[in-house]
């Protein structure tokens, strides 16, 4: 692979540092990560985060707390669970938990919410001088033509037009960024999934939209101006283009992590098959079990990487 030769991978002594691409950052005497309630003068970021190797992000604060507690147990770390406190407790925008080399952070719903968090998280990893970091989004999604409960490992994130790109408006220009993810990492995760009994997983494209209802072709929003036939035609064309699930953050996640030299993956469980329905009718217990599937896969992956299994 020619990945390691990419100039934006900033290697030094064989270490892959997280890099920010902003000449102004070096000229700032202090950097306040406002939405995380952290800063370079108020916190010793290298001491707090310098050993981070795996960053897991997901929409819901409670799910990301549960993931950190699960990871803590799986890593067999000595300190008690009570030591895993919300590092961002000073703000209720996002929450963050750390256990050993694993950081677990919530990002809320949608592109603007995750993008604010990622700007501050990437700067945090840079200020903390972290190296060789892998970042994984674990989440929920709507499947297309696959059984509910299947876990989709994204090879490429695509937009609503099935294009592998993210359009960022900057001043009054539109800048188009690539949404390719690390194919080797996706394969590695897929191989890892095969070792878990009764674990339906596949690799496919993930479509990222700006809305859950009209933006995902649902017939059950407060507004709907298209027919059932048009909806199905759109979703079938998405399937033909390789799309296996729909969610709301993957394109900007892939674009920002790619530009900043982070090895990135997206792993989402599907809660329904959009060719069958729009409403999520799963019982609470089934929903909770499905939501734990990406967590189980990632914990196995991390343990394997750390030589623990
Ligand atoms: C998946 O689930 C959320 C919407 O229900 C959204 O954050 C996403 O990407
Ligand atoms: N999340 C989404 O974005 N869409 C779904 O259909 C389910 C979860």
Image: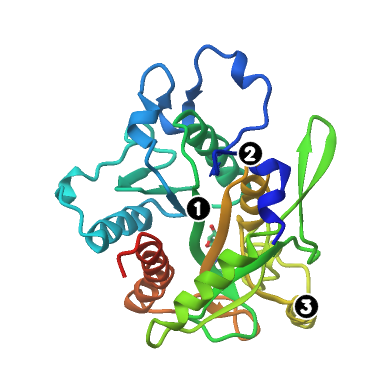
Q: How is the image coloured?
A: rainbow
Q: Is residue 142 left or right of residue 92?
A: right
Q: Tell me, yes or no, whether the two marked residues, 1 and 2, touch with CB atoms within 8 Å.
A: no
Which residue is under mark 3? 227
Which residue is under mark 2? 10
Instruction: Return the disc, 3 or 2, that comes first in the chain's sequence.
Output: 2
Neighbor class of circle 3 (other Cα within 10 Å; few <14, some 14-19, many 20+) is few
Q: Is residue 183 above or below residue 2?
A: below
When asked about the image quadrant of residue 24, the answer is top right
Q: Residue at x 62, y 45 (%)?
A: 261
Q: Is residue 64 above or below residue 48?
A: below
Q: CA distance from mark 1 to mark 3?
A: 42 Å
Q: Nearer the viewer, mark 3 or mark 2?
A: 2
Q: Position of residue 65 (x, y in %)?
A: 32, 53
Which residue is under mark 1? 134
Near-viewer residue (7 or 257): 7
Q: Is residue 138 left or right of residue 221?
A: left
Instruction: Return the disc, 1 or 3, that comes first in the chain's sequence.
Output: 1
When asked about the image quadrant of residue 174, the answer is top right
When asked about the image quadrant of residue 66, the answer is bottom left
Q: Residue at x 65, y 44 (%)?
A: 9
Is there any visible trace of residue 126 in the rendered image?
yes
Near-viewer residue (49 or 269): 49
């Amino acid at each position: 692979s020619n990945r390691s030769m990419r100039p934006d991978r900033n290697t030094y002594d064989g270490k892959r540092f997280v890099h920010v691409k902003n000449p102004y950052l070096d000229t700032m005497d202090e950097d306040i990560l406002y939405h995380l309630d952290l800063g370079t003068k108020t916190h010793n970021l290298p001491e707090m985060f310098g050993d981070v190797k795996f960053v897991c992000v997901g929409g819901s604060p409670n799910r990301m707390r549960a993931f950190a507690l699960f990871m803590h147990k799986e890593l067999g770390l000595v300190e008690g669970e009570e030591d895993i406190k919300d590092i961002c407790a000073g703000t209720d925008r996002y929450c963050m938990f750390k256990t050993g080399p694993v950081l677990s952070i919530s990002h809320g719903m949608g592109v603007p919410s995750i993008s604010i968090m990622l700007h501050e998280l990437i700067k945090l990893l840079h200020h903390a001088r972290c190296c060789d970091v892998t970042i994984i989004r674990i989440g929920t999604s709507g499947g297309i033509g696959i059984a509910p409960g299947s876990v989709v490992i994204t090879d490429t994130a695509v937009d609503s037009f099935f294009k592998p790109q993210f359009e960022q408006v900057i001043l009054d220009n539109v800048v188009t960024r690539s949404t390719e993810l690390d194919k080797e990492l996706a394969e590695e995760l897929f191989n890892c999934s095969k070792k878990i009994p009764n674990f339906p997983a596949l690799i496919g494209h993930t479509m990222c939209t700006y809305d859950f209802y009209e933006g995902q072709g649902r017939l059950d929003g407060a507004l709907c101006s298209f027919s059932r036939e048009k909806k199905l035609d759109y979703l079938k064309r998405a399937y033909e283009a390789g799309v296996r699930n729909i969610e709301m953050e993957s394109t900007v996640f892939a674009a920002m992590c790619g530009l900043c030299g982070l090895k990135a993956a997206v792993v989402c469980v599907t809660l329904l098959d959009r060719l069958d329905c729009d409403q999520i009718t799963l019982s609470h217990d089934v929903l909770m079990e499905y939501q734990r599937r990406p967590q189980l896969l990632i914990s196995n992956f991390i343990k394997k990487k750390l030589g623990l299994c």
